[in-house]
Amino acid sequence: MPLARPQTSNAIFIWLLVIAAMVSAMILVGGATRLTDSGLSITEWRPVTGAVPPLTEAGWQRELELYRSTTEYQMQNRGMSLSEFQFIYWWEWGHRFLGRMIGLVFALPLLFFWVRGMIPDRLKLPLLGLFALGGLQGAIGWWMVSSGLVDRLDVSQYRLATHLGMAFVILGLSVWLALDARYGVNTRLPDRVSKWTFAFWGLVFLQIILGAFVAGLDAGRIFTTWPLMEGRLIPDGYLGGMGWLQAAFESRPAVQLHHRWTAYVVTLGAGLLAYGLWTSAHPDLKRAALWIGGVTLFQVMLGITTLVHAAPLSLSLLHQAGAILLFSTAAVTAWKSRRT
């Protein structure tokens, strides 16, 4: 009689948490790559051979020559020295290398756990799907980079938002599946409380996507006053000569305004959700209420501080780390609400 497959696994739990931590690091390195204008320094997509950086002077000169063909070099960085080019190159190379490492750290243990029969049956398909999303993310990354090589100084903000959004989807699924691996898959239908936690999680995700448009358009470096935008509720140039729909994604004042006001909605939602969780009878949800409220307030203060200092690298990365923490907290809260 064959042995029954385990329904929980501590090893898979730890493995998926490592993946979640690496994806979080990937998001931060990607943010630094964007903020240092390093993302267009590697102009080719070589999934295998690109893992090896230039090792000779001739190799570095070849990479610099390829970069000189980009619009960014010709209009913004003309005359850049080799050492200056190497600085931005290493950021982009590190970002891509970390992506390759995540692929290996996911694929090899997955194969090992699968062969050893350690994966709960209900997690097999989700884990394969997560692996496929990782491969798709690599293709999205190149799709994003290619948008900035010709006729643009930066990558498309639409593609940047897609790339960042997929990173957070992978992060959320990694956390969720890790908890399922440790405590078992829950099949209970969602109740009113869990629906609210999922709604808040989705709202945080929306705010992150809006933040990607702010980053893509460098909209965090204008209107650096709070709570008003240079003394106005609706800033000058909100539409920027565009239609309403286009301005929502392409006007720098509009993009920043929407990110600000969605932050207020997130704060209000966090307060209401925290109150609802606190008044519940379950101690896990009471603790979740404190986390949701505390992390949201911390992230709001970080956002305001980053804004009024015109989004320097250090504060911008800290704000992005706060987004990762808030998103992960919302994910764990949503997962817990399905089981209490």
Image (spheres, helix red, strand yellow):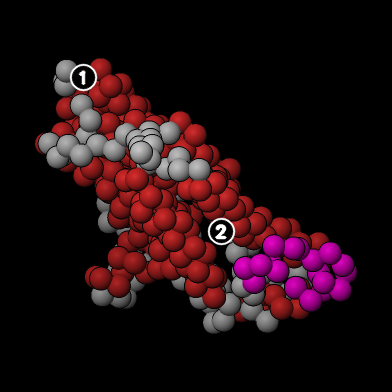
Pick the quarter of the image with the C terminus: top left
**Structural distance between the alpha carbons of marks 1 and 2:** 42 Å
Q: Which residues are magenta?
A: 46-63
Q: Amino acid at mark 2?
A: Arg
Q: Which residue is nearer to you in this view: 149 or 127? A: 127
| Residue 203 drawn above or below residue 137 | above
Mark 1 residue crowding within 10 angstroms, few (<14) / some (14–19) / many (20+): few
Disc 2, SS: helix
Q: Which residue is nearer to you in this view: 45 or 57? A: 45
Residue drawn at (30%, 52%), measured in percent from left and top?
Answer: 206
Label 1 close to label 2 by CB (< 8 Å): no
- Asked which quadrant contains residue 182, the reply is top left
Image-based side of 192 in relation to 124, left or right: left
Image-based side of 127 in relation to 80, left or right: left
- Outermost residue to the front: 1
First-in-chain label (1 vs 2): 2
Residue drawn at (48%, 55%), measured in percent from left and top?
Answer: 221
Q: Which residue is nearer to you in this view: 240 or 145? A: 145
Residue 58 painted magenta: yes
Disc 1, SS: loop
* Mark carried by residue 34: 2
Q: Amino acid at mark 1?
A: His
Would you name the residue on which mark 1 appears? 282
Which label sits in the foreground, 1 or 2?
1
Asked if one can make out residue 88 in the rendered structure from this viewpoint, the answer is no
- Asked which quadrant contains residue 277, the reply is top left
- Outermost residue to the right: 57
Q: Which residue is nearer to you in this view: 156 or 230? A: 156
> Residue 262's spot in the image, x, y percent?
28, 48
Residue drawn at (32%, 61%), measured in percent from left and top?
Answer: 254
Pick the quarter of the image with the N terminus: top left
